[in-house]
Image (tube, helix red, strand yellow):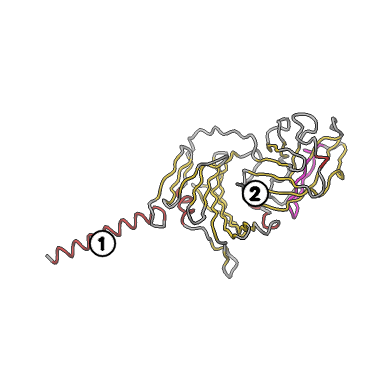
Amino acid sequence: MKRLNTYLIILLAIVVIIIFAVNLGNNGIGTQAKHFDNGEISFDYPGTLTELNGTGSNITSFSDNSGLNITLVKERIPPGYNLAKQVQFNGIGNVDKNFQLVSTKNVTVNGVTGYESDYNLQDGNISKQRKEVWFQKNNAIYGVIYTGPGSVKTDDSGLSVSAAGNELNTIINSIKINDNATNKNKIVGWAELIMPTIGGDWQITSNSVNDPAVYFIPTSYYPGENGQTALLGHHTTHSAPFSGITQLKIGDPLIIKDYLTQKKYTYEVTSNGDDIRWGVKGVSIGYQSSSVPELWLITCWPTGYSRAAYIVHSKLVSVEPLG
């Protein structure tokens, strides 16, 4: 009888160990993992997270009671967009003390090279850590954005020590993109330009300058990069998005909501009316790198004619998470 009891105890212990190991393997935190699958993207996520409805370019979001939020994003890639370049020339840490880039490294996600960036984010009196993992597949860009309490620490060697928990790793390590899924999303506008002082909220497109939108000049730099971002808008036709830019004053804000990086960039006008280039088209200007990201608004000049390029200059002054 004693031998039988010993065997039963050993068997029970083995069962407990197996159950614990299975749960641990599901998400690394001992809670049964859940599964998300919308036919295009699938992944596991910890059962401690509650799924929220996705909005805009968001596929879905998750949160818990500790202030942790994880958002999955998808955007079609506009012509000329280079994810590796965007990561390499990320100028956030040079501009806004409240949104500091700590480190960037390459990672592998679903068999392709991705890019992982750590940030320290100051939201009022609250310090937060933000980790972003971006990768590109099937002409789309996917992002997993982790935001939680605390800050990203560095060790004595200056190397980043990841502050993101197993919640994020569970998603990253299990994410799969269905290559056979039909991608019906069209590239219309990948960002918005807002001009609060003169009114106007316009989509930014890479497709055609004749759209009722403003046109991103592909030879310029994307928002957030250390260079000159150039937007071209009509002055009198096609809804005339830039009909009022001559009224902009020094210090006026210009805002870009960028869905490719999930960030809001705020610029301030530095000059207006000082740069009129006769015989020059906005698309023919050679745009340069710069120590602080710049935004140029360009329209035809004089009113009703296209004899010159009228340019409003501004510089980046702050960066915030979008949403």
- Magenta segment: does it hold 302? no
Query: Most extreme residue toward the left, as rendered?
Result: 1
- Magenta segment: does it hold 285? yes
Residue highlighted by disc 2: 86
Amino acid type for the residue under numbered disc 1 = Ala
- SS at badge 1: helix
- SS at badge 2: helix
- What residue lies at 64% left-to-right and 34% top-to-bottom? 188
Q: In the rendered structure, are the residues bearing label 2 and label 1 in contact, judged by CB atoms less than 8 Å apart?
A: no
- What residue lies at 52% left-to-right and 41% top-to-bottom? 54
Query: Most extreme residue toward the bottom, as rendered?
Result: 156
Amino acid type for the residue under numbered disc 2 = Gln
Total labels: the figure holds: 2
Q: Nearer the viewer, residue 260 or 256?
A: 256
- What residue lies at 44% left-to-right and 41% top-to-bottom? 37
On the image, which quarter does residue 155 sit in?
Answer: bottom right
In the displayed structure, 104 sits above or below 193; it is below
Instruction: Indicate the position of residue 204 as horizontal and vertical percent values.
Output: 69, 38
Residue highlighted by disc 1: 13
In the image, the segment drawn in magenta is 281-297
Question: Which circle's residue, 2 or 1, is located before the other in the chain?
Answer: 1
Image quarter of the N terminus: bottom left
Q: Would you call the spot at circle 1 few (<14 residues within 10 Å), some (14-19), or many (20 or more)?
A: few
Query: Could you tell me how far apart the alpha carbons at marks 2 and 1 are, in whole angstroms?
Result: 52 Å
On the image, which quarter does residue 160 sit in?
Answer: bottom right
Q: Is residue 323 left or right of residue 265?
A: left
Instruction: Indicate the position of residue 267 as horizontal and vertical percent values.
Output: 74, 49
Q: Would you call the spot at circle 2 few (<14 residues within 10 Å), some (14-19), or many (20 or more)?
A: some
In front of the other: label 2 or label 1?
1
Instruction: Indicate the position of residue 270 as horizontal and vertical percent values.
Output: 81, 50
- The circle on residue 281 is none
